[in-house]
Amino acid sequence: MSTLVEVVADKVSDYGVRLAYGDPVVIDGVSIVPVAIAYVGFGAGSGNASGKGEGKAGGNALWRAIAETEEKPTAKGDADMSGDGNASGEGGGGGGGAIPIGAYVKSGDTAVFQPNVIALAAVAVPLVIAAGWALRGIIKVLR
């Protein structure tokens, strides 16, 4: 049986270029290939534990240590730490995005990159501001 991490890795392994370059579109004899800066991230977890008896929550050492002390859970909603002790868990999540930066436009035998000026400005403005703040800090230190 494959783990959650292996399943997620199989799903995202073929993204790469497909995320950065879109499918070519032909409009009036001109071929256009959209280009984007793409990023994907994901995380996953897995777990398994076993143990039997009172106070052993799935063999977890922390819960065993708590159960072996004289103090028992008393607050409403605390976990019942009795039972067969089998435990399992999986989880995961991910996300990503793309910023359209332009397109390759092929007309005849030549292909030219046409930038998306609005998207590039939206990406460049925060970068320029951060560089300005850093430069201001460097100048203050050097005075």
Image (cartoon, helix red, strand yellow):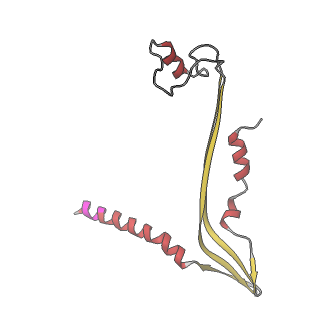
Of 3 and 141, the residue lying toward us: 3
* One can see residue 40 in this view: no
Q: Relative to residue 137, is residue 57 depicted above or below?
A: above
- Give coordinates of residue 42: x percent, y percent: 61, 49
Left or right of 112? Residue 69 is left
The image quarter in which residue 138 lies = bottom left
Chief secondary structure of the magenta portion? helix
Residue located 54% across and 20% down the image: 61
Of 53 and 93, the residue lying toward us: 53
Q: Relative to residue 86, is residue 25 depicted above or below?
A: below
Write the start and end of the magenta stretch as one range. Answer: 137-141
- Give coordinates of residue 34: x percent, y percent: 67, 74
Residue located 67% across and 78% down the image: 104
Q: Quadrant of the N terminus?
A: top right
Residue furthest toward the left? 143
Q: Quadrant of the C terminus?
A: bottom left
Residue furthest toward the front? 76
Residue located 74% across and 71% down the image: 23
Residue 18 sits inside the magenta stretch: no
